């Protein structure tokens, strides 16, 4: 058995949970058996999410790696919260005594505690135990920089991000138009900026922050954080950029989407997919259909139906009822509309795919970059607007769909706008060709970063050495 264990405290959201477990596995591998992994599993607040987490746990527990899952006792959920973010915050905070107890009961010494970005209310438990404490930040360095700046930015702002005009200064990025501020900080529907400000402050109490990115992908922002340009007068914790690695699980029969791609020419297909909770209404679907049809390009479109009552997950779409009549017939052979889950990684890895219309969740973006696929960002929620801006204005790997306009709460795209963007993405414009070139450069960059001798490889090694038994510990 390993001499010491790293304690992980992930959040229940699938993207966060699995990204963190992957980081844990890579830390284990890099430690060469010196460390084991103990994952403290909070019970998710909804049955659907809880069962999803259970699926992950069951699969990973059977992986044969040195990982132990400990389920924390259920807590009584708070009932008087105004916004979902406040609920999450308090729900997580209530786990503090259980986390302390679980850790006290561990047989092996604790090398470090790593918490999800939303679990920073639990950093104090680590502080009391006097072990190194890290935040796992499952998003971009750019969003991290923004969150670190948030307390200062808010002091300077007289109106909300949604109402303000002009640009926001995020150290290391070109000036960010206020319309590209993350929906989680700027949307009318949520009133949660205080929570994010709290998280931003708490990051400063960590011994280090782990991000699923690489120095080469986000040099500007990561340098700005390291140079102390986000929180003036206080050096930020060291950021360990250890990503990205994309790997495939055991491959079964190729999925039908992949089989369809086999019959398409190289780099000819535009792939549209809006993430595990992305769902667009009927009017928007009609515009997409018309835009795709007019663009003349080949497409693979993952189209989901509305979530069932009480769920946030889309259902399988009823294509005949949703698509304009005759659409499937008219696009037969050059287009596939897929109404259900699709294997996004396998699709993006396929040589027939030439572009990706994406909601810009960071996991999706990393997959696209890993396979060198240029993007058209269609941000929906969370921090995705900022990701979109970074892809367009900083990395240059994306073609803009349309100007963002926050005065309209819903982002509605007309057929002609999508048609133009798709034509550009597929190389009909100089901007599009440039994005395509850039995306291929990023593919090489990502792979170099995580290969032996690369920056992310070295960052992972350094992180593991500092927490391993006999290691130096995190830098002060
Ligand atoms: C980083 O993101 C990629 C893309 O979603 C994911 O496959 C991977 O598990 C994430 N985590 C790490 C540590 O690489």
Image (cartoon, grey):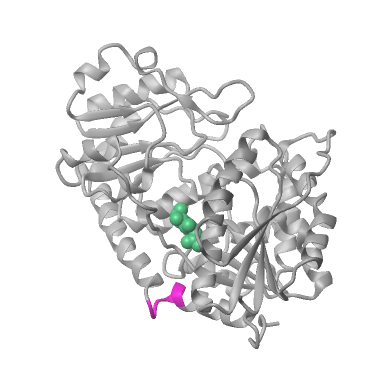
Q: Where is residue 420 in the image (x, y as percent from the top left)?
A: 29, 34
Q: Give the range drawn in magenta.
A: 452-457
On whether residue 453 falls in the magenta region, the answer is yes
Identify the image quadrant of residue 396. Answer: bottom left
457 displayed left or right of 139: left
294 displayed left or right of 43: left
Q: Compared to 415, does 353 lie above or below?
A: below
Residue located 57% across and 67% down the image: 66
Q: Position of residue 450 (x, y in %)?
A: 40, 70
97 displayed left or right of 271: right
| Residue 171 or residue 147, whichever sits in front | 147
Q: Compared to 293, does 158 lie above or below?
A: below
| Residue 2 or residue 48, whichever sits in front | 2
On whether residue 216 falls in the magenta region, the answer is no
| Residue 218 or residue 470, whichever sits in front | 470
Identify the image quadrant of residue 259. Answer: top left
Residue located 65% across and 44% down the image: 185
Answer whether residue 199 is visible to the viewer in this image.
yes
Q: Position of residue 270 (x, y in %)?
A: 27, 39
């Amino acid at each position: 058995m390993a001499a010491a264990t790293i304690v992980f405290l992930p959040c229940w959201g699938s993207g966060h949970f699995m990204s963190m477990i992957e980081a844990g596995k890579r830390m284990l591998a890099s430690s060469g058996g010196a460390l084991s992994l103990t994952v403290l599993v909070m019970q998710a607040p909804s049955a659907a999410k809880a069962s999803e987490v259970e699926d992950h746990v069951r699969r990973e527990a059977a992986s044969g790696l040195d990982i132990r899952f400990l389920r924390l006792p259920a807590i009584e959920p708070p009932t008087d919260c105004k916004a979902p973010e406040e609920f999450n915050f308090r729900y997580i905070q209530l786990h503090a005594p259980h986390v302390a107890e679980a850790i006290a009961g561990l047989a092996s010494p604790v090398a470090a505690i790593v918490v999800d970005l939303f679990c920073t209310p639990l950093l104090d438990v680590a502080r009391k135990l006097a072990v190194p404490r890290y935040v796992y930040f499952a998003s971009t360095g750019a969003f991290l920089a923004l969150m670190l700046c948030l307390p200062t930015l808010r002091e300077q702002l007289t109106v909300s991000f949604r109402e303000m005009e002009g640009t926001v200064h995020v150290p290391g990025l070109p000036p960010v138009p206020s319309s590209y501020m993350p929906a989680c900080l700027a949307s009318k529907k949520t009133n949660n900026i205080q929570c994010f400000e709290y998280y931003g402050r708490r990051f400063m109490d960590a011994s280090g922050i782990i991000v699923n990115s690489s120095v080469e992908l986000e040099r500007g922002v990561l340098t700005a954080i390291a140079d102390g340009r986000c929180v003036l007068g206080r050096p930020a914790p060291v950021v360990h950029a250890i990503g990205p690695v994309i790997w495939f699980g055991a491959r079964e029969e190729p999925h039908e989407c992949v089989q369809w791609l086999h019959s398409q020419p190289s780099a000819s297909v535009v792939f549209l997919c809006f993430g595990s909770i992305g769902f667009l209404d009927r009017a928007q679907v009609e515009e997409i259909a018309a835009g795709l049809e007019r663009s003349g390009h080949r497409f693979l479109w993952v189209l989901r139906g509305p979530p069932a009552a009480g769920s946030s997950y889309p259902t399988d779409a009823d294509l005949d009822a949703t698509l304009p009549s005759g659409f499937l017939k008219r696009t037969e052979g050059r287009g596939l509309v897929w109404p259900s889950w699709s294997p996004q990684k396998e699709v993006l890895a396929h040589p027939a795919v030439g572009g990706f219309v994406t909601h810009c969740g960071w996991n999706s973006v990393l997959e696209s970059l890993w396979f060198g696929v240029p993007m058209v960002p269609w941000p929906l929620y969370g921090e995705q607007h900022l990701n979109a801006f970074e892809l367009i204005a900083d990395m240059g790997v994306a073609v803009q769909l349309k100007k963002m306009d926050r005065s309209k709460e819903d982002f509605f795209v007309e057929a002609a706008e999508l048609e133009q963007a798709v034509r550009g993405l597929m190389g009909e414009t100089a901007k599009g060709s440039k994005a395509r070139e850039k995306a291929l450069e990023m593919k090489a960059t990502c792979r170099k970063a995580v290969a032996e001798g690369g920056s992310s490889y070295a960052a992972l090694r350094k992180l593991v050495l500092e927490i391993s038994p006999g290691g130096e510990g995190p830098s002060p």
